Image (spheres, rainbow, N blue to C red):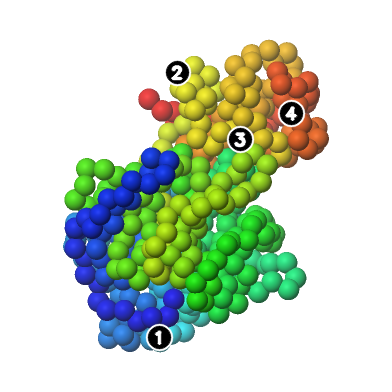
Amino acid sequence: MFKPIARLSVVPLVLYITLMAEGATKVTIAINSPITPVADPTKVLTTSGYCSGGVAGAVSIVNVTTGLSFSQIPGFPGCSEVAMVIAPALAGFTAGTVYVAYPNATGTATVLASIPAGGGAPAPIGSISGTFDHVGLIFDTSGLYGGALLLVTESGQLFTYNGSTISASGAISTPAGVNLHIESPAISPIGFGPLGGLLWFVNEGGDEAGDNKLYAVTPGTFKAQAVIAIPVGGNPPRAESIAFVSPSACAVPIPGQTTSATLLDALFGLNQLAFYNAPATFAYVNIEYDGNLLQLAYNGVSYSFSGSPFDTGLGQQEHLTAGVCLSFCTLTQGGYKNNFNSRVTNFPGGGLVLGGTFYTNSDLNKILQNNAVKGNGLISLAHQLITAMLNVAYGALPTSAQAQAIQDANSLIATIQPPGTKVIPPLGSGFLSPSATSALETTLDQFNSSKECQ
């Protein structure tokens, strides 16, 4: 992104409604040069302004739902995409609060600030040294990176804000010979294949020097592994943004409509904001200049893009976003086994990866229905693990300790499960000593029982 734009204006007018494949629909709203949209069930916001026009200018944030001003970002020298995110119901944060990151007035630091859920002036929290064209703000909804607000720079610096303090956490590294230009980092949903729950990003290519691949970041080491090459076109050829629509993605309001959406795309070049009721359990990737929006899935074996674009003819695109939920609840094993069994049999992901092997919805249900524990810790651990992973997939937010227990349980199962096999009874005959599983079961049960759905 490099083009200065005019002051934002929003017209709550539907340009057109399109019926798409898989029952999806698209509604576009006329809005001048949107860049960073965010949304929750109460509001849709977008930034406008790549260059603020200097310290005397400002970047606008508009509430697209009402058509009114939400906030003004103070002016800054040069140009930068202002990052923005809405807080979910994560410990230490007030759900609905908006966080933004932008250059300071002297162009020497990047400010992190908060804005009340109802709008108002940004309240600076602190800053990090340097300014950047791209900074990502992401809430760690998987709990694998400390359960905080993550601030990721285009060069790979990683900072966390826990509600009180901004801390440097480390630096993201790529394989030897790969240049790094991080764009649009996002947490993938637990259950989205073996890399579910991890921080993913687009390594923006073209004149931005990245390789136009998707990467996933390992917690702790912050090493990035390539997931898949993105088919790009346009001039310059740049992959731009990624967003995940999980089973828990909350519907957000579409101005002037009684319908709602789960995915938003900033169509900068067309002066439009696109609202999609996009199918869940997919990732969506847009290409900045070729006008395509792609759909990425995990098929039980590998990640792959759909054979044809999810949408085309979109002009220059900026950021994608999915609806943020402001509350959540959990179910126990009994809940999924009995009253809410359809959430297992009809789980949109088609199954979960347990211990490195993909188990289908039918497999998961057979395991949950199996009460013949008989001193086998693998069965009781699988009950709690499946329940926890479904809870996260449906929007529950684990603590860091609970998220680690999910990872550790999967790792423990992997020690007795050869790749591609299914050892969990009644599908297999695997065994773990209860003494090896009891501590993990306790932590997972605490999560599964923490905020029971009524």
Q: Is residue 354 left or right of residue 271?
A: right
The residue beneath circle 4 is 422
**Mark 3 crowdedness (10 Å alpha carbons): few <14, some 14-19, many ≥20:** many
Q: Which residue is mark 2?
A: 339
Residue 190: which quarter of the image? top right
- Residue 78, which numbered label? 1
In the image, taking residue 173 as reference, residue 59 lies left or right, namely: left
In this rendering, which labeled residue sits more in front, label 4 or label 2?
Answer: 4
- Residue type at mark 3? Leu
Mark 3 element type: strand
Secondary structure state at the residue bearing disc 1:
loop
Nearer to us of marks 4 and 1 is: 4
Looking at marks 1 and 3 on the same chain, the residue that comes earlier in the sequence is marked by: 1
Residue 352's tag is 3
Task: Answer with mark 1 or mark 2, whichever residue precedes in sequence.
Answer: 1
N-terminal-most mark, 2 or 3: 2
